[in-house]
């Protein structure tokens, strides 16, 4: 029987932090009325929460159970 993985504290902090960063960036920093404006300089703010989300998922997937 395989042991189930659970999210540990550092991964949970990264996941919740990236969620709140996405909310903050969407509300206060970036307004994207159409898809063609997504690739402008202002939307680079989405890189920070995306990096933390990738770190959390990478840590969860590659952790030894």
Image (cartoon, helix red, strand yellow):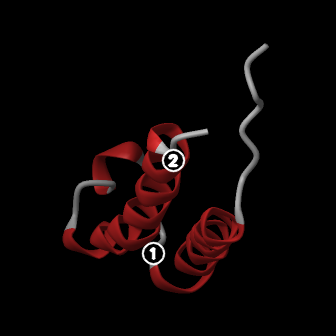
Expressed as whole percent of the image width and height from the top left, the position of residue 18 reads 57, 68
Closest to the observer: 19 or 12?
12
Tell me: residue 61, above or below residue 17. above
State the quadrant of the N terminus. top right
Which badge, 2 or 1, comes first in the chain's sequence?
A: 1
Cα distance between the residues tagged 2 and 1? 25 Å
Label 1 residue SS: loop
Is residue 57 toward the left or the right of residue 24 in the image?
A: left
Q: Dot 2: few (<14), some (14–19), or many (≥20) neighbours within 10 Å? A: some
Closest to the observer: 64 or 19?
64
Label 2 residue SS: helix
Closest to the observer: 31 or 43?
43
Tell me: residue 8, above or below residue 13. above
- Mark 2 or 1: the one toward you: 2
Image point (43%, 47%), residue name: 58
Expressed as whole percent of the image width and height from the top left, the position of residue 6 reads 76, 46
Q: Dot 1: few (<14), some (14–19), or many (≥20) neighbours within 10 Å? A: some
Expressed as whole percent of the image width and height from the top left, the position of residue 12 reads 69, 65
Residue at the disc numbered 2: 57
Image point (50%, 45%), residue name: 63
Tell me: residue 53, above or below residue 14. above
Q: Quadrant of residue 35?
A: top left
Image point (66%, 75%), residue name: 20
Expressed as whole percent of the image width and height from the top left, the position of residue 52 reads 45, 66
Residue at the disc numbered 1: 30
Q: Give the total of numbered labels.
A: 2
Is residue 60 toward the left or the right of residue 50 in the image?
A: right
Q: Residue furthest front?
A: 1
Image point (42%, 53%), residue name: 54
């Amino acid at each position: 029987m395989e042991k189930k993985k659970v999210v540990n504290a550092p991964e949970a902090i990264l996941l919740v932090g990236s969620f709140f960063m996405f909310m903050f960036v969407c509300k206060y920093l970036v307004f994207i009325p159409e898809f063609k404006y997504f690739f402008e300089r202002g939307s680079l703010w989405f890189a920070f929460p995306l990096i933390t989300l990738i770190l959390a998922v990478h840590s969860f997937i590659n952790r030894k159970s």
